[in-house]
Image (cartoon, helix red, strand yellow):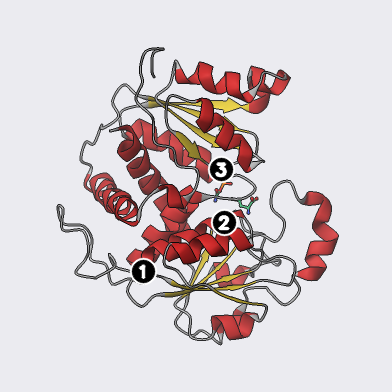
Amino acid sequence: MTTATNETEPRHFLDVDDLSEEELFAVLDRADEYKRAVDAGEDHADLSGQTLGMLFQKASTRTRVSFETGMTQLGGHAIFLGEDDIQLGRGEPLKDTSRALSRYVDAVMARVFKHENVEVLAEYSDVPIVNGLTDDAHPCQTLADLLTIREHEGGFEGVSGSEATGGSSNGGFDGVSAVWIGDGNNVAQSFALGCALTDIDLTIATPEGYEVDDAVLERARELGGDPTVTTDPVEAVTDADVIYTDVWISMGQEDERDVRMNDFDGFQVNADLLEHAPEASVMHCLPAHRGEEITDDVIESERSIVFDQAENRLHAQKALLSWLLE
Ligand code: CP
Ligand code: NVA
């Protein structure tokens, strides 16, 4: 919460590159510490008395529950604000909603359609705005993805005090190759930025017309990444460490179902595709549409790390919130 006279500029998290590389690793290391604290049953009420507003224009299971549970575990409180439950749904301008919320809560997490809407929230907010998914980006998902990759693929042994690099030059991601298969959507775009910041070697395989935006690829290169772009899923996954996919029809694209189902033919993550990547772990941000972008047997197989990803949303977001609010 801020008052009218508070002049401190808040930090926002609208996409992954709102964090520097050093800050990103600080958040990941803090997430590791919170994960260990939960496992050990240690008290970590670092946001005691603080409140998170959670604004949702779209459905959610993981984002809603992990943020709310995270605030509880940190000794704070979260308020669910469905668009149709608040005056926003009756036409109150977003900028007024943002300014009013700033006077009550300590941070706002927002899941909206247009990415510009989190930018408007941030412009008018005196407290941190956290992007809980827009049509263009899903940076909280990327935090959890990176944490999961580091645990499973990076040879990272966990944080020890401030010695957080795991003995590796890039904080535990040395030599990891990841492949995105499917739609170059919001999850893919934030993941591309996250891979660039962590030096993960990324290949993106999409059908023609569904590529990650050029501006995102350009930004990834500015951040030191060098993503490979292809339309050939088999070539992309060969010898990969991680294969990551997401739905072919994102929230808001339901009218495009028939066209998309046709266009994504050949991009399913299934047993045949995995034969080309015998060591690869399989990731999915969930919710999954089994039989479309991924098969049931793959998601249920030992190679699937999707529920570790889901769990890591909790730890990563707690770390982000406490880092933004300290
Ligand atoms: N991955 C993810 O953001 O899931 P929800 O839509 O359930 O929040
Ligand atoms: N790309 C999906 C992600 C859901 C978490 C969507 O936007 O619907």
- Residue labelled with disc 1: 152
Return the x and y of residue 285 as percentages of the image width and height: 54, 57
Mark number displayed over residue 171: none
Question: How packed is label 3: few (under 14 Cα within 10 Å), some, or many (20 or more)?
Answer: few
- Residue labelled with disc 2: 187
Ligand 1 contact, mark 3 (Cβ < 8 Å): yes
User: Which amino acid lies under the numbered mark 1 shown in the image of this protein?
Assistant: His
Residue 12 found in image quarter? top left
- Of the residues under marks 2 and 3, which one precedes in the sequence? 3
User: Which amino acid lies under the numbered mark 3 shown in the image of this protein?
Assistant: Thr
State whether residue 137 is above or below residue 152.
above
Question: How packed is label 2: few (under 14 Cα within 10 Å), some, or many (20 or more)?
Answer: many
The reply to whether discs 1 and 3 touch (Cβ–Cβ < 8 Å) is: no
Q: Nearer the viewer, residue 214 or 245?
A: 214
- Residue labelled with disc 3: 61
Q: Is residue 305 visible?
A: no
